[in-house]
Image: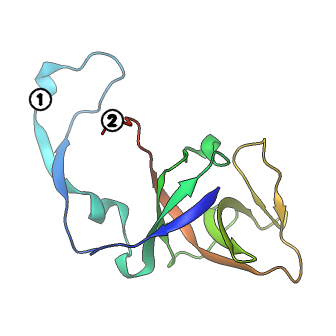
Amino acid sequence: MKVTLIKIKDPKTALSLPLYSSRVPAGFPSPADDYIEDILDLNEYLVKHPTASFYARGEGNSMVNCGILDQALLIVDRSIEPAQDDIVIAVIDGEMTCKILDKKGHMLRAANPSYSPIPITEGMELTILGIVVHAVNQLCMRS
């Protein structure tokens, strides 16, 4: 999955929206559950370490099997130490990509089995920029 960086305008800017206390069923909603529990600030919820985080845009379908769709907004945290099976933003020979880190197998894997793994070899220019902690997918293209 190709990755493009997106600049964070101001991590202190709040976007607070109502958070309903009832879960949203896939069937018919209950009118009795019609009250707001709290206010949710999406920046606070999605970005735990503002000074060590950045946004990126994923492009392609190599990560669809882990819920990252084409054009997903990725929230990336640089303060987390990369571990086995983390979804990472990596730079390989100057190209950014989003893949699953397989330390044991010495490779970066796509979540989609149609894509071949990328072996991590000696002499390869590889930098892990951070861990993908959230992916925001647009479900309605009209919005």
Q: Earlier in the sequence, mark 1 or mark 2?
A: 1
- State the image quarter where residue 141 is shown: top left
Residue 85 seen in the current view: no
| Residue in the picture at 54% in, 44% down | 69
Percent across and percent down for residue 31 are 13, 20
Please give the name of the residue rendered at 78% of the width and 81% of the height, measured from the top-left corner. 125
* Pointer 2 residue: 142
User: Do residues under tags 1 and 2 come within 8 Å of each other at their CB atoms?
Assistant: no
110 in relation to 96, above or below: above
Q: Position of residue 136 (x, y in %)?
A: 42, 50
Assign a secondary structure to mark 2: loop
In this orientation, which residue lies closer to the viewer: 37 or 121? Answer: 121
Task: Give the amino acid type for the residue marked by disc 2 in the picture.
Answer: Arg
Can residue 120 be seen in this snapshot?
yes
What kind of element bears circle 1?
loop
Quadrant in which residue 43 is drawn: bottom left
Residue 118 badge: none
Quarter containing the N terminus: bottom right
Label 1 packing within 10 angstroms: few (<14), some (14-19), many (20+): few
Q: Is residue 70 above or below residue 22?
A: below
Distance of mark 1 from mark 2, alpha carbons?
Answer: 26 Å
Looking at the image, residue 58 sits to the left or right of residue 35; the answer is right
Q: 10 Å neighbourhood of mark 2: few (<14), some, or many (≥20)?
A: few
Q: Residue at x 64, y 41 (%)?
A: 65
Q: Which residue is mark 1?
A: 34
Left or right: 31, with 113 as reference point: left
What is the number of callouts on the image? Answer: 2
Question: Which three-letter amino acid code belongs to the residue tagged 1?
Answer: Asp
Which image quarter: residue 113? top right
Residue 47, compared with residue 122, is above or below; it is above
Which is more toward the observer, 106 or 138? 138
* Side of 36 relative to 49 (left or right): left
